[in-house]
Image (cartoon, rainbow, N blue to C red):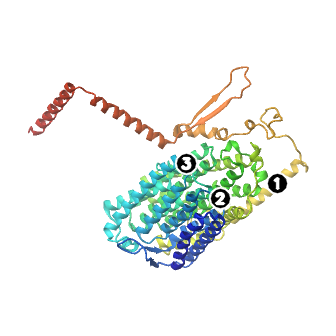
Amino acid sequence: MLTTLCLLLAALLLLVLPAALGLVRLLRLGGALVMAGLAVLAVLALLAPSAAVMALPLGPPWAAALVALDPLSAWFLLLLGLTGAFAALLINPGPRHEMVCFPLFLFGMALCITAADGFCLLLGFEAMSLASWAILHERRAARLYLMFAIFGGGCLMAAMGLLAAGAGSLGFAALRAAPPEGFVALAVLLLVTLGAGAKAGLAPLHLWLPLAHPAAPAHVSALMSAVMVKVALYVILRMVFDLCGPAQASFWGMPLLLMGAASALLGALRANLENDTKAILACSTIENVGIIAVGLGLALMFRGADMAVPAALALAGALLHVMNHGLFKCLLFLGVGVVLEQAGQRRLDALGGLLHNMPVLGWAMLVGALSAAAVPPLSGFASEWLLLQALLGAWRTGDALFQFAALVALAMVAMAVALGAAAMLRLWGLVFLGRPRSPRVAGAEDVSGPGRAGLLLPAALSLLLGAFPALALGLMQPVLAQWLGPAVAMPGGVLGLSAGDAGARYMVLPAILLLGVLALVLWRGAQWRGGGGATRAPAWDCGFIAPPVHLPFGNAATQPSGEGFAQPISRMLAGPLMAARENVAVPPPGSMASAEYSASSADPTWRALTTLRAARHAVSNRVDRFRALSVRHALGLLFATLVLLLAVLAGLERP
């Protein structure tokens, strides 16, 4: 199995050749086949877990590089293989460096996930970061992303150095045998949280993500959001859960719990305020990564308190959401890429009515949007239900501080879930419903060929995992046994999910049946009330007069805009947190011009950095005043300082 893994990794490197030659079809086919092979290999590794380690003939001067495929690696490799295959099917021709960096990006993520020593883990992590940085189109986004990548890589290198100093080796087996203790362990926790948190986009280290993900091509954005940020979470799992040993205190989960809750709320709120479709999905990624981090923090807290059942519930919910979010977010980013290719627009206010000309894309993206909105019985609801049940059970820890932190996190995550649903409704409704706002949008064509398979397959998997989450939980069993022991019970069965023996239950199949009956009743009721005939009437234009002849698609001003759709949320929630502002320019009486509405907001982290920069400039200006002193004033200041120091020394010497 490890030999097959090495052959597939080598095949990823060989894909650089067709990418450099511009053979896009060969790159699509080869990339999809190699990534599908990695997914099959990951399933086999989960069905037959193994702790074998393979030494490569390559590596640093002091030792050979090591790779392995334990259950945790296999779970994340399965996500990479599936989403990588879907993204490869929608590769579009681009600059040569962009095409070459794509297989290197895949190779870096695969190497980091399957590493069995610190050298391979850091090498894959940095290769992933540099390859994705080279693909970004916008200079500002690339510069900011590189800064955070350097910061994250430096923190992880320092953490790995502290781990290796106590073990005398970079191999994971040696690191497990000598876990850190005391202040060294706390330093490792801090460095890993900062380094991997910066790559995952956890607040307040998330500033690069809303800029970098939209700046990449659609197939790369899909992998950055679906897999790359999850690789950072994998690093947290590997270095904190695994290499630091199981005997850690419960407070180790507090940083992930608080950072995750803040990320979830901030990302969901920003997703409701953005008007760029890819920026909306990027901010939604911040929300979902925050929710996963909350689950990981809860698992650490419960494991530190020797509570295996709640720890299994939290860890299962986090890992299940890793898979679910990867699938539906890959689908949404690939769909937005098709929209950009066909309609030439990414802004909500420039799109509309695409469901009429692009039904396959529209219905596939509806599945992804409903999954992201955590609507039952789709996949996003199952994993978020497990995580919310774990949060509700945090009162069992017995520590008032942890209970209060979990209560705050529960309120923030619940609000984030509601805001995330509103953001997905806004995205899909304004893009696919209504009327086209331009001739090119009206002439957009639906996806076909391999691209259609790249959209329908993740949509089908989202439906499958939503209806049968037990399939994913069954594959996940070796991962939970690896961290919590083989006797831990799975939080689910054939019919649904459960939060322990005496906890709540989510019966998936009965819920599907009930929703189907309600939908049938509503449909038949609408037919009965409608009188049995189709009635056609002009579209409602909010009281505006009929559009003139030169506007065959109607007046765009009569349709809801992205800013107008977000206005209630902006007024209620975004004022104090996001500094949201509105401006309505009303024309003078007698003017035929229309009123203009504009809205603005600012991320609180950006505002904090701006405040610090202003304070630094103020201090610098005061220092410059001292530089402008004359010789007489400078000597007087020096003499006064000397007298003050002598007085202080005299006071200290007095008995």
Residue 138's label in the rendered image is 3
> What separation in Å lies between label 3 and label 2 (alpha carbons)?
18 Å
First in sequence: mark 3 vs mark 1 = 3
Residue under numbered circle 1 = 523
Q: Amino acid at mark 3?
A: Glu
Q: Which residue is pictured at 61% across the width and 45% down the height?
A: 272
Q: Quadrant of residue 635?
A: top left
Question: What residue would you read off at disc 2?
Answer: 92
Q: Position of residue 623 (x, y in %)?
A: 30, 33
Determine the secondary structure under disc 3. loop
Q: Gap in Å between the C-alphas at discs 3 and 1?
A: 48 Å
Residue 468 is left or right of residue 539, and the answer is left
Kindly identify which numbered label has been placed on residue 476. none
Q: Is residue 7 above or below residue 633?
A: below
Vertical order, 342 against 555 (above or below): below
Q: Are marks 2 and 1 in contact (CB under 8 Å)?
A: no
Please tell me which residue lies in front, 464 or 541: 541
Q: Is residue 222 above or below residue 411?
A: below
State the CA–CA distance, disc 2 to disc 1. Answer: 41 Å
For the residues carrying marks 3 and 1, which lies nearer the camera in this image? Answer: 3
Is residue 609 toward the left or the right of residue 319 in the image? left
**Upstream in the sequence, badge 2 or badge 1?**
2
Q: Residue furthest left?
A: 655
Q: Could you tell me the amino acid type at mark 1?
A: Trp
